[in-house]
Image (cartoon, grey):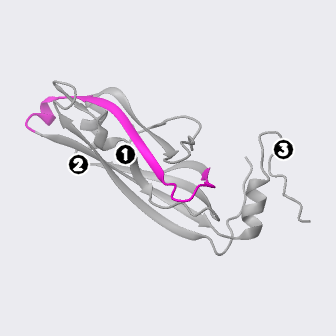
Amino acid sequence: MITNQLPHNARYIPTSSVFTATFNTPTLGKYDFNSSGNQNTVILPNLDTNSIYIIADMQVGGNIPQEEYLAAINTTPFIRLKTKVTKEIVYASVIPVVLYSQSKDITAYVHSDKGGDQLVADMQGILNQTSYLLGLPSVSISITFSIFAMDSRDYNEYFRGVSQDTLYKPVRRK
């Protein structure tokens, strides 16, 4: 496992988003997260072109007990992180949203060279209506990300020098 220490001046940016599945919308008889309200949900509203962001972990909770959530899963809910303007997929695969958790390590780096870009998330998945959920109009899942922003010029150059072929090769200054 390769680890790098965060610069001492890294800014901590806590974020929180709620994704809601409404009963019968859009799928009859189900709680479906595949709605437009759960697509392109803004996680970070303005990615600074001079910053590198590290998504350190995520926490998951909901408005129903975890055991009831697990019992209701029809299609495993998942979240996909991406940038809105450049459409870069941030994490190599989707992140399943199965267990509520205090902290799930999902380390990923984000940066954008386009002004006005945003970090956004899409959530999909379907829950069945179980006896516990009878009469409940919607199920909400809250996802909190712990994000650090690195504004250091040295760190920025170091990060941008990383490629698939040469991991963590620093950029040489002229």
**Could you tell me if the residues under marks 2 and 3 are in contact, i.e. CB atoms within 8 Å?**
no
Residue that label 3 marks: 166
Answer with left or right where residue 40 lies relative to residue 140. right
Does 90 lie within the magenta span?
no
**Could you tell me if the residues under marks 1 and 2 are in contact, i.e. CB atoms within 8 Å?**
no
Stretch in magenta: 109-135
Does 121 lie within the magenta span?
yes
Q: Quadrant of residue 122?
A: top left
Q: What residue is shown at x 49% (from left), y 44% (from top)?
A: 81
Amino acid identity at mark 2 = Asn
Marks 2 and 3, the one that precedes in the sequence? 2
Amino acid identity at mark 1 = Tyr
Q: What residue is shown at x 62% (from left), y 61% (from top)?
A: 49
Q: Residue 100, which numbered label? A: 1
Q: Quadrant of residue 158?
A: bottom right
Can residue 102 be seen? no
Answer with left or right where residue 120 lies relative to residue 167. left
Residue 157 x %, y %: 77, 61
Can residue 77 be seen? yes
